């Protein structure tokens, strides 16, 4: 099946659709990117359709499901980053001066989360945002 033959209504199974260079070109065009790489979640969705012999699932459904899976993965990654940030902050000796460590960590996290820097705790944050967190010093 050629890239120009693939549409959002193309069935994932029993239609000739496969994850090949033609499909890669279709997805690159669809997402308006120069290069497209297939995702593991895409293969899982297609494999499930094959196992269940579900010939109602289309390329459009694949895209929707893939985006849902990727959104959940992004959320899990943010949770993981926050958990590590709090853990690193609380294990830092300098954090012992605060009455409410979690509140201070949350204030610092808001800045880190919005920044382009790595989403990790650094003691320099204590100096950088001292004015905002000084009211929590014991």
Image (cartoon, rainbow, N blue to C red):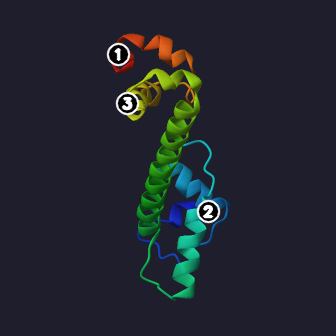
Residue for point 55% across, 50% down: 28
Q: Which residue is tagged 1?
A: 132
In the image shown, does 64 or 6 lie closer to the viewer? 64
Q: Which of disc 2 and disc 1 is earlier in sequence?
A: 2
Viewer can see residue 137:
yes
First in sequence: mark 3 vs mark 1: 3
Q: CA distance from mark 3 to mark 2?
A: 41 Å
For label 2, the crowd category at 10 Å Cα-Cα, with few meaning under 14, some 14 to 19 and many 20 or more, is few
For this orientation, the residue located farthest to the left is 135
Quadrant that contains the N terminus: bottom right
The answer to whether the residues at label 3 and label 2 have Cβ atoms under 8 Å apart is no
Query: In the image, which disc is placed on residue 1?
Result: none
Q: Which mark lies nearer to you, 3 or 2?
A: 3
The span from disc 3 to disc 1 (Cα, nearest Å) is: 13 Å
Q: Secondary structure at mark 1?
A: helix
Observer-nearest of 59 and 16: 59
Residue with the most extreme right position: 21
**Residue 18 location (% of width, % of height):** 62, 71
Residue at numbered disc 2: 40
Q: Nearer the viewer, mark 3 or mark 1?
A: 3
Q: Considering only order in the chain, which callout, 2 or 3, is on the residue closer to the N terminus?
A: 2
- Kindly identify which residue carries mark 3: 100
The residue tagged with tag 3: helix, strand or loop? loop
Residue at horizontal 41 percent and vertical 70 percent from the top: 9
Q: Is residue 85 above or below residue 108?
A: below
Question: Counting other residues with Cα less than 10 Å from the Cα at mark 1, is it few (<14), some (14-19), or many (20 or more)?
Answer: few
Which quadrant of the view contains residue 131? top left
* Separation of residues labelled 1 and 2 (CA atoms): 43 Å
């Amino acid at each position: 099946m050629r890239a120009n033959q693939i549409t959002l209504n193309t069935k994932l199974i029993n239609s000739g659709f496969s994850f090949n260079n033609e499909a890669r070109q279709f997805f690159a065009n669809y997402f308006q990117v120069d290069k497209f790489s297939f995702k593991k979640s895409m293969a899982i969705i297609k494999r499930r359709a094959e196992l269940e012999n579900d010939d109602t699932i289309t390329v459009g459904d694949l895209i929707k499901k893939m985006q849902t899976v990727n959104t959940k993965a992004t959320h899990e990654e943010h949770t993981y980053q926050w958990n590590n940030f709090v853990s690193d902050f609380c294990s830092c000796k300098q954090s012992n001066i605060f009455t409410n460590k979690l509140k201070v960590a949350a204030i610092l996290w808001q800045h880190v989360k919005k920044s382009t820097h790595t989403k990790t705790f650094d003691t320099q944050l204590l100096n950088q945002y001292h004015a905002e967190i000084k009211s929590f010093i014991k």
